[in-house]
Image (cartoon, grey):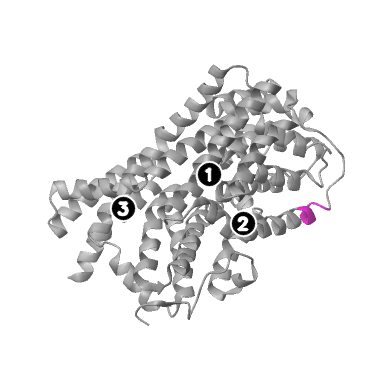
Amino acid sequence: MNVILAIFKFSPVFLMAGLMISGMDALLAAPLAAVWAAIVAFITDKLSFNEIVETAIDNVKEMQLVFFILMAAYAMAEIFMSAGVAASIINVSLKLGLSAKTVAVTGFLVTCVLSVATGTSWGTFAAAAPIFLWLNHIVGGDIVLTTASIAGGACFGDNIGLISDTTVVSSGIQKVEVIHRIKHQGVWSLLCLTVAAIIIFVTSMHLPGIAANANEAIAAIPQEVWDNLNQERPAAVTLLNQVQEGVSPIMIIPLIVVIITAIKGLPTLACLFLGIITSLIFGLFTGTVTSISAFLDSILTGFSDAGSWVIVMMMWVGAFGGIMGKINAFAPLSNLISKISKNVRQLMFYNGVLSIVGNAALSDEMAQIVTIGPIIKTLTEDNVEGSEEDLYKLRLRNATFSDALGVFGSQLIPWHVYMTFYIGIASAVYPLYKFNVFEIISHNYLAIIAVVSILLLTLTGLDRFIPLFKIPSEPDVKLKNK
């Protein structure tokens, strides 16, 4: 009877996973799952309607700061793409010219930087694909390697970028500061980037060394591709035009300001608003910002983009999580992992595995973050004891799990919405090749390295050799029932 009750309480998670796998948008799947969770709560725990609503709202209230950060992040991402910051980064990166030997690794490094600057993997890939896929065509590079490389690079900043929605949300759910999260995983992320770049470069050594430039690639883009981009991602069209026309290198300064203030420990919102203000100042000076009105329109677009999907979806998933927590729906799962975990590192490893499995089940990294994130948070809080400082470090790792195994894990799941998006954009931008999802996965070295390394480092304790990445283990922390 207890098993049946546990399965029934967990059924809202199965419902959400099933709806996501069927192709339903998380914005609709989340409220449907929340409604079913409310019905389950009424049946199993005899909660009244008012108690259910109050529980849901209380959980959503805890995300209020995250909502403001997301709006500011989306606004700054839109401004960076429209005010010339992103174009300046690309132009500076491409000054030396490219060949077939270097097009993939250059595309990888440029998208890594660009994704940190814009905080969006989707926007970065949409902006970079037309440049690098046609550059690859001109110099005779490996189209699969180049596509996979910019796909991996586009996800780098989505995992560690200060303005990335997944970074902000995963940190908020685990109750850790975004800046602390970035510092925790910073060296590990850079090591993954370095190893992946070396592999990409070595893999390209057999290719010819004929040079080309971005202007040739952009000029070769068919009108049909321009039309598709203008419909799917207008900001990418603006960025490409700026790359072609040229942007002053001083437009990199807003990104530098954001990075420096973040390192100095300023609050995330302060860093974001400084990025927005410096973009306005330097944009007016260089001419990339034509008017205050146009600049404010970009902010409005960013706010609208955040409010039209991610914030609304998070509110519903927050309500869902609050109800599920109220009825202790995750208690059996917590008990199972507690029983099979012999120490804290094993428990944290299972949190990582749960994150990647949840990502595969939900086929959406944000849905995984807001659904599985609270579960691994509860698992850690209920089963581990230690000082507040050590428990905070464990929360940092949980936040990194949610984000890294959400963003990079999505690159290794064939049916994931990420892969559908990438294949769709690549096919639209470069119709001369029939892209295969398994080819892209097998050449996405950054995703493979990131996913495998974080799990193994956590389980084996080898993370102690990476600065700031070590998590505490026995005797500093211990399982409560061991």
Q: Where, by quadrant of the figure, is residue 140 drawn?
A: top right
Q: Are marks 3 and 1 in contact (CB under 8 Å)?
A: no
Image position, residue 334 (x, y; %): 34, 69
Q: Residues within 10 Å of mark 1 (few under 14, many from 20)?
A: many
Which is the main secondary structure of the residues drawn in magenta?
A: helix
Q: Residues within 10 Å of mark 2 (few under 14, many from 20)?
A: some
Residues 340 and 113: in front is 113
Residue located farthest toward the bottom when viewing the structure as drawn = 482
Residue at 59%, 52% (x, y): give it. 438
Residue 442 in sight here = no
- Magenta stretch? 201-205
Residue 281 in sight here = yes
Residue 204 lies in the magenta stretch: yes
Dot 3 or dot 1: first in sequence order is 1
Residue at 56%, 22% (x, y): give it. 295
Q: Which residue is mark 3?
A: 321
Residues 293 and 388: in front is 388
Residue 249 relative to residue 63: left or right? right
Residue 362 relative to residue 473: left or right? left
Q: Which residue is mark 2?
A: 186
Image position, residue 424 (x, y; %): 56, 37
Q: Residues within 10 Å of mark 3 (few under 14, many from 20)?
A: many
Residues 245 and 297: in front is 297
Say which amino acid is labelled 3: Gly
Image position, residue 388 (x, y; %): 43, 67
Image position, residue 322 (x, y; %): 28, 52
Q: Which residue is mark 1?
A: 164
What is the CA distance from the residue labelled 2 to the residue labelled 1?
15 Å
The vertical placement of 64 against 406, above or below, is above
What is the CA distance from the residue labelled 3 to the residue labelled 1?
22 Å
